[in-house]
Each structure stands twice: as C-alpha cells, then as structure tokens.
Image: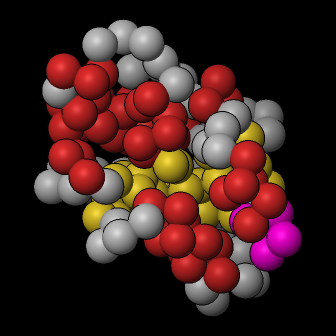
Amino acid sequence: METRPLLIVDGANVVGSRPDGWWRDRAGAAARLRDALAPLAAGGLPPELPPPVEVVLVVEGAARDVPGTVGVRTVAAPGSGDDTIVALVRDAPDRRRLVVTADRELRARVTALGAEVHGPRYLPRP
C-alpha cells in the first residue's frame, strides 16, 4: 500500500492564476510549473506536508505534451482536466490526497471524496 501523500496540481488553473504572460506559451508555463514542483517530491512543504510526496501535475490542451520529470508525474487529461483530477482522487481512497486548484466546482467535487484542497498560493512560484 502506498503511504506517501498524493499532491495533485490542476496545471491549467494554477498556471492561469498568475498573470505572467503564460498565454503566449502554455506548454512552457506548464513546464516551468512542473520544474518548480519537482523539489516537493523529496522536500514536501513543511510543516503541513512532510516528505516524501507523490507529485502529479494534470495537464490539458496546449500543455498536454509536457512530459514528467524526476519527482513529478504528468497526466495528460484526455478530456476535462477536472474529471481527470477527480478520477485520481477517487482512485487513491486510502491515501492523504491534496489538490491544488482555485476552481470552486472542482474543490467541491474532490472534498466530497475526502481530499484536502489548497489554492495556487500553496505552491512555490515557478
């Protein structure tokens, strides 16, 4: 049984929450977010999220082809990123699950499944 907490990041939502020109290069913005998340796998986010952590970045649209890297698994949403995130939460019922998003509807869906939710400011900035 997996014991590491599962940190699921709503890539499109987190990237879109920062007005830094991401719209000019969506894949590049997702890759920068992925790289900023990589240290969390071994370092966690003390004191709330001690290491080690399984980090999953859900990508969609123009960022769908952004590959994973050491410490971060990317999951390309075949349709709705929200539906993919809900499935990831649902498929890990015995683990601590944290979802990072500002999407209110998604927040409601994953908290109903027992996940914790944090806004984009919970993460380090890329």
**The stretch drawn in magenta includes residue 68:** no
Q: In which quarter of the image is residue 97?
A: bottom right
Residue 48, can we see it?
Answer: yes
Q: How many labels does the image show?
A: 0
Question: What secondary structure is the stretch in magenta mostly built from?
Answer: loop
Locate residue 50, reporting x and y percent.
Answer: 70, 46
Locate residue 114, reporting x and y percent.
Answer: 83, 70
Q: In which quarter of the image is the N terminus?
A: bottom right
Q: In which quarter of the image is the C terminus?
A: top left
Residue for point 59% across, 55% down = 7
Residue furthest top in the image? 20
The answer to which of 52 and 61 lies nearer the viewer is 61
Which colour assignment does the render follow?
Answer: secondary structure
Residue 53, can we see it?
Answer: no
Residue for point 25% across, 52% down = 61
Q: In this view, does 8 lie above or below 92?
A: above
Q: Is residue 116 above or below residue 84?
A: above
Locate residue 125, reporting x and y percent.
Answer: 48, 19
Q: In this view, does 72 lie to the left or right of 103?
A: left
Q: What stretch is highlighted in magenta?
A: 110-114
The answer to which of 35 and 59 lies nearer the viewer is 59
Residue for point 56% across, 78% down = 87
Q: Is residue 10 left or right of residue 103?
A: left
Q: In this view, does 91 lie to the left or right of 16?
A: right
Locate residue 51, reporting x and y percent.
Answer: 62, 49
Residue for point 27% across, 24% down = 23
